[in-house]
Image: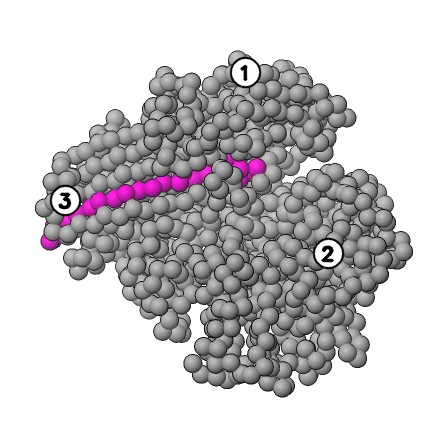
């Protein structure tokens, strides 16, 4: 929709050209959320396009995802055969409430910064041990694991004028076996619970719980859990107040779906039986 | 700046915060529609460098130097893109408002996406079709019949006349016009559920550059009215003012700002200072009549047609035939239960709105998105004390209605603004305004008691209904009466009792909604029939057969009705039950499901009067045109109901010609005559009868003229293939044109229908569902509906009405829910949080028609537009009960709602 209070758009090309952050400013990445709701408090958009951050960079140790990388660009990533976790990317993209048309515009950074419980790029990058790099408003950089970056429903660690630059995924995480489960109130609705399990070569099972909880929660099992150990761990670490409630799912149901999907993941990854 | 749109260069510069959608429309590309303006519905889809995007989310400046293709440019140099042709051949649209975005999206799908349409099309909402015809288009199926021989149009699947324009994005909806000097209206809305306006300070708002007027309750006529439009004004209370000094729900309009741009009007809205005295608010309908409850319309009386303003009672009814209590006490089996139907929104993809201007001759013109142009004209003439001939209300194509546009939500403000400023004005509601400030379905609590004897004969039926009409009583009474009427009059039962109350609350008003109260009552009645059948060990089909009315049976619901004009013009309920039973038993695909999935069947039936009571009037005019074709003028509006197609079929059949020779003009008060409106499924049954009468009259005159010329008996003349024929003599219509010219008088006739007597139509819905006891998820394995529409005027379109009704009802039964918090605020006024069914959510419904011919309706046809909606939630509830053994009484039947009871029962 038209953002009628916007009077200016800045187009910085380098970090030094970023304007001094003032009240009424907003970063413009894809704009798919920004332009979807009235933003009457805003006066200026700072367009990140001309910073020309490479969408995806693969180094020896990391896959580096620019905050401005679109969902479609990430979905198009073809990794080497030993990146067993690559199918997760498409699974998480499909978990978007929005369609493929939005994927062409919406960005990974935008999804993280929105910090909705159902943000599937939060699920993906937290499950893959992603680490955020933030350009601090006052200069300098800060790194925070994605799982700590999102602190609650539409809350995160950014402070005014901070800019999420990129998310670095360790290559090792991409080589893990993964299992994905998601449920929502409608066949292609917003995620009410989205769980990702991954298995390290050393046998460590990591379970990342998102969507059902107000922030991503990661459970680590150094030793293979049985069904009841898994249940106990979830009960212990995901307290009732952490379950999210809104029109997309009541907390009791989200809690039970979390337990159910976690058990399905456990069985898939460990080949276990009930 | 330079933009390339559909191959043409544009050098205009967008505003800094402008989105591509409005920029494209400002440059004249009206095919780019606004459904939600928030990226959720896909109606604004365009190609950006060949890739589909939602143009409402794209900052316009980002299109600079790139190529944009809208629906208007999709075909390039050719006549039609193959996808446009496919949509035309499948008639994959009804109102057509989503069609441009749907076609652009579908045209861009790759093969992989085409095999997974549920995912590929989740960003495109169609509110009308139920998606089957869209899938047909993608599969290359042809649903329309090629042209048929003269005089044979009725009963054939002829295409909608607007089709070619719709698929090219050229059909003109309400806002698809450019007017010079247009001013924009934005509304200041109440943030309080109940408050008195103490003072309004306009100064800051008027100081915003470009603001022309700030209109408040001090500027508006203070007449009391209802937003509801009915032929008879007495059907609705007088409780509403254009702008009031008391606000009774969050979202009620407080002031209207008229400005050069929407931006200026919005800024002035933010700067208007309004002092409120907060009044206690009543949100819970159960508390409405409790002594001490806040009184919402304390200054009104029964003279304002409010049942009891001091008890917040907009309307009530009580009545009993026989002795229900005594019958229940002695019945072999009884059932009682309480059912809650929630609040849902029409979600027509075109929002309410319109344009108004006073022309050089002093006529106030209102171009608006309405189902009722003539009744709106009458209301505006009354309110502004203008002669009827000084007000013109019209619509071209309307982007969906579903009852929501049987109201006057914008036209009064538009008229006020146009009259005050002397300028053309426009008001286009946002999607959020649709949710918080137009109307919804009436939420209802229905308590039912029912009994039967050992033979399965009903002994008693009792309904106690509490309907929540919200802050105003538009449609409060008629919806409540309708809920309590055909829901039980379809059953023979010696003892019946009804108690109904429609109460005010400080919430967004409820209003007319497809089904008009029946779906909310049916979910209780049809559950009770099933529960009694189960106790008796009788099948749901057999139980109904033993109790439904048959021709000759009185259709009774207490208290005795003052209207005695409902007749069995035809009867196909027995066939509908048979058709559904047979289809449900037929072999079908057996999906592999784990034992966690519980499977069950359920049915429900509905009867509906074929037109609203107390008169529904339609005039039609038809004239022989210079080329030997005909000009047909009707008042009824087209919003996807398909009546434009049917009226041409009726006229072409009666006049022995082909539909392409019938030129239709419609829904414009300037054309003369009267039309109550396109509601109550009256477009075919009532207005079609007027067209039939006019055409019959014209046929008689044409035959008489030929007989006169031939000096033969008029009885020996018939119409055949665009000519009057008598034996070997043949006078083509083109010759009759010459005859008319010679005698100095064209051939023209009028027809009229008063909407009485009325007939009855029937629908039976069957579902087979699977419910996962571990997750609460529900899958529809089979959906069958049989409809008794008399002679089906257009099988393709009627099937579409049934499928669309099932889809919309499934939305309400499974997903959609407006949530109002304790303060009266709608918490989810956007499609992202109000899940409309998308392609993936809707099963294919097998549609069957009963073989009947109505003695009252035009050419044997009956209405079939809203009733397919009615039995859906009830049938689904019955299927879930059959599958799980649990009676769920409050839709929507979402997994998280079903889960607690499933957990209790199955662990």
Please give the residue where the numbered disc 3 appears in the rendered image.
Answer: B328
Q: Residue at x 42, y 18 (%)?
A: B299
Q: Which mark is residue B44?
A: none
* Res A158 label: 2
Q: Of B539 and B175, which appears nearest the observer? A: B539
Q: Which residue is drawn at the image coordinates 49% and 38% (left, top)?
A: B823
**Residue B389: percent from the left, percent from the top?**
53, 16
Mark 3 belongs to chain: B
The residue furthest bottom is A202
In which quadrant will I find the N terminus of chain B? top right
Q: Mark 2 falls on what kind of element?
A: loop
Q: Which mark is residue B221?
A: 1
Q: Chain of mark 2?
A: A
Secondary element at image label 1? loop
- Provide the residue span drawn in magenta: B433-455
Q: Residue at x 65, y 68 (%)?
A: A126
Quadrant, the C terminus of chain B? bottom left
Are the residues under badges 3 and 2 in a single subunit?
Answer: no
Mark yes or no: residue B70 visible: no
Q: Nearer the viewer, mark 3 or mark 2?
A: 2
Q: Are marks 1 and 3 on the same chain?
A: yes
The question of residue B820 being in magenta is answered with no
Q: Chain of mark 1?
A: B
Residue A241 appears in the picture as rendered: yes
């Amino acid at each position: 929709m038209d953002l009628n209070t916007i009077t200016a758009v800045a187009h910085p090309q380098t970090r030094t050209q970023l304007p001094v952050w003032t009240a009424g400013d907003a970063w413009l990445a894809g704009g798919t959320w920004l332009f979807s709701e009235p933003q009457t408090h805003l006066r200026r958009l700072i367009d990140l396009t001309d910073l020309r951050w490479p969408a995806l960079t693969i180094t020896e140790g990391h896959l580096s995802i620019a905050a401005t990388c679109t969902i479609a660009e990430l979905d198009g990533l073809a990794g080497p055969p030993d990146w067993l976790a690559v199918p997760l990317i498409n699974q998480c993209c499909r978990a978007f409430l929005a369609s493929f048309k939005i994927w062409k515009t919406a960005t990974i950074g935008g999804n993280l910064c929105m910090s909705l419980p159902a943000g599937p790029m939060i699920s993906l990058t937290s499950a893959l041990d992603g680490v955020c790099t933030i350009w601090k408003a006052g200069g300098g950089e800060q790194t925070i694991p994605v799982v700590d970056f999102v602190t609650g429903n539409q809350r995160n660690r950014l402070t005014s004028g901070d800019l999420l630059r990129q998310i670095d995924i360790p290559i090792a995480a991409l080589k893990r076996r993964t299992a994905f489960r998601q449920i929502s109130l409608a066949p292609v609705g917003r995620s009410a619970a989205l769980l990702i399990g991954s298995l390290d070569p050393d046998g460590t099972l990591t379970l990342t719980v998102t969507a059902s909880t107000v922030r991503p929660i990661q459970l680590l099992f150094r030793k293979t859990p049985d069904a009841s150990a898994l249940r106990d761990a979830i009960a212990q670490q995901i307290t009732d107040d952490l379950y999210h409630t809104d029109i997309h799912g009541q907390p009791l149901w989200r809690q039970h779906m979390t337990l159910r999907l976690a058990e399905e993941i456990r069985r898939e990854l460990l080949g276990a039986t009930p | 700046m330079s933009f390339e749109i559909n191959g043409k260069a544009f050098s205009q510069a967008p505003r800094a915060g402008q989105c591509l959608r409005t920029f494209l429309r400002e440059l004249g590309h009206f095919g780019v529609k606004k459904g939600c303006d928030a990226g959720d519905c896909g109606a604004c889809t365009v190609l950006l460098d060949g890739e589909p995007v939602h143009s409402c989310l794209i900052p316009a400046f980002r299109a600079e130097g790139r190529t944009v293709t809208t629906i208007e440019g999709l075909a390039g140099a050719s006549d039609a893109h193959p996808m446009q042709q496919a949509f035309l051949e499948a008639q994959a649209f009804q109102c057509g408002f989503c069609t441009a975005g749907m076609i652009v999206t579908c045209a861009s799908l790759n093969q992989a996406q085409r095999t997974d349409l549920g995912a590929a099309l989740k960003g495109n909402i169609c509110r009308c079709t139920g998606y089957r015809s869209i899938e047909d288009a993608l599969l290359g199926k042809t649903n329309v019949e090629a042209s048929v021989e003269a005089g044979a149009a009725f009963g054939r699947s002829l295409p909608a006349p607007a089709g070619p324009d719709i698929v090219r994005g050229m059909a003109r909806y309400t806002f698809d016009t450019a007017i010079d000097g247009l001013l924009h209206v934005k509304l200041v809305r109440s943030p309080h559920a109940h408050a008195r306006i103490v003072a309004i300070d306009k100064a800051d708002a008027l100081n915003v550059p470009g603001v022309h007027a700030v209109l408040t309750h001090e500027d508006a006529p203070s007449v009391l009215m209802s937003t509801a439009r009915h032929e008879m004004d007495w059907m609705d209370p007088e409780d509403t003012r254009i702008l009031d000094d008391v606000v009774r729900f969050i979202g009620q309009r407080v002031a209207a700002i008229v400005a050069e741009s929407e931006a200026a009007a919005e800024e002035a809205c933010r700067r208007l200072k309004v002092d409120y005295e907060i009044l206690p608010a009543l949100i819970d309908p159960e508390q409405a009549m409790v002594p001490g409850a806040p009184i919402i319309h304390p200054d009104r009386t029964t003279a304002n047609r409010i049942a009891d303003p001091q008890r917040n009672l907009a309307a009530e009814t009580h009545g009993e035939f026989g002795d229900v209590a005594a019958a229940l006490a002695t019945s072999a089996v009884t059932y009682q239960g309480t059912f809650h139907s929630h609040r849902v929104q029409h979600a027509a993809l075109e929002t309410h709105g319109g344009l108004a201007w006073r022309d050089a001759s002093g006529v106030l013109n209102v171009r608006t998105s309405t189902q009722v142009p003539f009744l709106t004209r009458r209301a505006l003439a009354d309110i502004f004390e203008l002669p009827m001939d000084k007000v013109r209300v019209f619509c071209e194509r309307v982007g969906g209605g579903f009852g929501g546009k049987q109201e006057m939500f914008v036209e009064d403000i538009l008229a006020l603004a146009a009259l005050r400023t002397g300028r053309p004005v426009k008001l286009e509601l946002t999607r959020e305004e649709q949710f918080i400030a137009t109307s919804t379905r009436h939420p209802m609590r229905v308590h039912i008691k029912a009994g039967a004897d050992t033979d399965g004969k009903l002994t008693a039926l009792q309904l106690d209904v509490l309907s929540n009409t919200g802050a105003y009583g538009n449609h409060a009474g008629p919806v409540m009466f309708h809920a309590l009427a055909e829901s039980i009059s379809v059953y023979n039962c010696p003892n019946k009792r009804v108690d109904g109350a429609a109460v005010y609350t400080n919430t967004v008003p409820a209003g007319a909604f497809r089904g008009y109260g029946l779906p909310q009552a049916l979910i209780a009645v049809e559950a009770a029939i099933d529960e009694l059948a189960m106790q008796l060990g009788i099948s749901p089909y057999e139980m109904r057969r033993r109790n439904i009315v048959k021709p000759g049976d009185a259709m009774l619901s207490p208290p005795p009705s003052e209207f005695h004009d409902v007749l069995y013009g035809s009867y196909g309920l027995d066939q509908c039950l048979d058709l559904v039973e047979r289809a449900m038993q037929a072999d079908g695909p057996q999906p592999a499901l784990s034992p966690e999935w519980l499977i069950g069947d359920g049915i429900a039936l509905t009867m509906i009067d074929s037109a609203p009571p107390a008169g529904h009037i339609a005039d039609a005019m038809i004239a022989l045109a210079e080329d030997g074709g005909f000009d047909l003028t009707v008042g009824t509006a087209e919003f996807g109901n398909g009546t434009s197609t049917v009226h041409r079929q009726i006229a072409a059949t009666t006049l022995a010609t082909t539909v392409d020779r019938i030129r239709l003009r419609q829904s414009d008060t300037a054309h003369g005559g009267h039309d109550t409106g396109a509601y109550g499924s009256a477009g075919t049954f009532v207005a079609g009868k007027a067209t039939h009468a006019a055409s019959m009259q014209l046929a008689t005159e044409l035959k008489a003229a030929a007989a006169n010329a031939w000096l033969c008996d008029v009885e020996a003349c018939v119409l055949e293939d665009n000519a009057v024929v008598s034996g070997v003599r043949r006078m083509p219509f083109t010759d009759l044109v010459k005859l008319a010219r010679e005698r100095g008088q064209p051939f023209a006739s009028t027809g009229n229908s008063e909407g009485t007597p009325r007939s009855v139509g029937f629908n039976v819905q069957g579902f087979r569902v699977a419910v996962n006891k571990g997750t609460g998820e529900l899958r529809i394995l089979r959906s069958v509906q049989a409809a008794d529409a008399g002679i089906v005027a257009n099988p393709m379109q009627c099937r579409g009405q049934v499928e669309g009704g099932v889809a919309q009802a499934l939305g309400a039964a499974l997903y959609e829910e407006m949530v109002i918090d304790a303060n009266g605020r709608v918490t989810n006024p956007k499609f992202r949080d109000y899940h409309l069914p998308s392609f993936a959510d809707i099963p294919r419904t097998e549609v069957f028609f009963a073989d009947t011919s109505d003695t009252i309706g035009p050419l044997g046809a009956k209405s079939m537009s809203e009733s397919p909606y009615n039995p859906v939630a009830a049938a689904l509830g019955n299927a879930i009960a059959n599958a799980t053994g649990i009676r769920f009484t409050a839709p929507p039947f979402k997994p998280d709602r079903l889960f607690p009871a499933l957990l209790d029962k199955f662990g």
